[in-house]
Image (tube, rainbow, N blue to C red):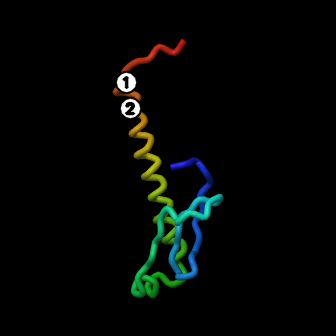
Amino acid sequence: MSSSFLEIVELEEGEYALQRMDSEDEPLVVIRFSDEVTEHLKEHQTAIAKAMIGAGVQAAGSISRAMVDAEEHAEGPRTLH
């Protein structure tokens, strides 16, 4: 994934999306709550969507770092001079 800035937006349909700020491409992630959950969460729906997206971004970052570390470890020691 590119290193551009990301933003969370509320779409017209009431869904929440994670998208690149500088792009008109489709959103990277979309969260849609059912009517039942929307009624239960009421005004807290936005905070929950932000928390869910934030947790996903953190998990993706951790996985990416682990993959880079594993690749570096598999290559063995390197001479850097």
Q: Which percent across, then down, holds residue 2?
A: 55, 48
Q: Reply above or below: 36 against 81.
A: below
Question: Which image quadrant: the C terminus?
Answer: top right
Left/right placement of residue 38 relative to residue 74 reads right
- Name which residue lies at 52% across and 78% down: 44
Using the rendered view, name the quadrant where residue 70 is placed.
top left
Q: Which percent across, then down, holds residue 38?
A: 46, 84
Q: Reply above or below: 38 against 8.
A: below
Q: As drawn, which residue projects farthest toward the top?
A: 81
Using the rendered view, name the quadrant where residue 65 is placed.
top left
Q: Amino acid at mark 2?
A: Glu
Q: Secondary structure at mark 1?
A: helix
Front position in the image: 46 or 9:
9
Front position in the image: 55 or 3:
3
**Tag 1–tag 2 contact (CB < 8 Å):** yes
Residue under numbered circle 2: 71
Q: Amino acid at mark 1?
A: Glu
Q: Reply above or below: 81 against 12.
A: above
Disc number at residue 3? none
- Name which residue lies at 40% across and 18% down: 77
- Name which residue lies at 52% across and 65% down: 27
Quote the CA–CA distance across marks 1 and 2. Answer: 6 Å
Residue under numbered circle 1: 75
Task: Count neighbours of disc 1 (C-alpha within 10 A) and say few if under 14, some if 14 to 19, many if 20 or more.
Answer: few
Left/right placement of residue 22 relative to residue 26 reads right
Q: Which percent across, then down, holds residue 9?
A: 59, 70
Q: Which percent across, then down, holds residue 7?
A: 60, 62
